Image: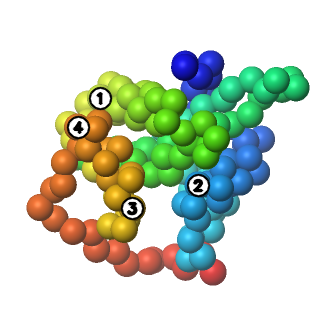
Amino acid sequence: MTLAVHTRPFASEDEAAVVELWRACGLLRAWNDPHKDIARKQAVQPELFLVAVAGRESGGQEIVGTVMAGYDGHRGSVYYLAVAPGRQRLALGRRLMAEVEGRLLALGCPKLNLLVRSSNHEVQAFYEKLGYTRDDAFSLGKRLIPDL
């Protein structure tokens, strides 16, 4: 079954639906304010924040997926890949990743990195099917601006 969707850059009126999608997908964490993450992304490479939109049977449109990416001239990064729980396993995540990979490649991005929580085996398997492999590295982090 092919999901009839189109992908477009995020628009400010999408914010509430996007945050709710991230909540439904379990992507939100207490230490990250999703509204601040969206505002930050809108200030830097907003064209790399995409939403997947599908028509509703009752009319109107529904945001059914998101992906956020960035490129610093050396590496690309992907965040907030999300597909609505009722729309998963329909290749939408694969399509969103292909779209953002194409946009990064067009910018000259030679390598893409992403983070997956070590406990999220299902998502690890998803990325492995897309050709991603584990790098011999681990992530370190330091918060410079607290969201709380």
Disc 1 vs disc 2: which is toward the camera? 2
Disc 4 vs disc 1: which is toward the camera? 4
Residue holding disc 4: 131
Choose the circle earlier in sequence order: 1 or 3.
1
- Label 3: how many residues lie within 10 Å, few (<14), some (14-19) or many (20+)? few
Between 84 and 144, the one lying in front of the other is 84
Please, what secondary structure does the residue beneath circle 4 have? loop
Give the distance between the C-alpha atoms of the residues marked 1 and 2, in whole angstroms: 27 Å
Give the distance between the C-alpha atoms of the residues marked 1 and 3, in whole angstroms: 27 Å
Residue lying farthest to the front in this orientation: 1
The answer to whether the residue labelled 2 contacts the one labelled 4, judged by CB atoms less than 8 Å apart, is no
**Residue, x 55% and y 60% (percent of image)?**
27
Q: Is residue 6 left or right of residue 45?
A: right
The answer to whether the residue labelled 1 contacts the one labelled 2, judged by CB atoms less than 8 Å apart, is no
The answer to whether the residue labelled 2 contacts the one labelled 3, judged by CB atoms less than 8 Å apart, is no
Residue holding disc 3: 120
Disc 1 vs disc 3: which is toward the camera? 3
Judge whether residue 126 can be spotted in this image: yes
Choose the circle earlier in sequence order: 4 or 3.
3
| Residue 129 drawn at (x, y percent) | 28, 38
Q: Is 9 placed above or below 146 here?
A: above
Please, what secondary structure does the residue beneath circle 3 have? loop
Q: Is 20 placed above or below 53 here?
A: below
Quarter of the view holding residue 63: top right
| Residue 29 drawn at (x, y percent) | 56, 71
Between 49 and 89, the one lying in front of the other is 89
Which disc is residue 105 wearing? Answer: 1
Residue holding disc 2: 25
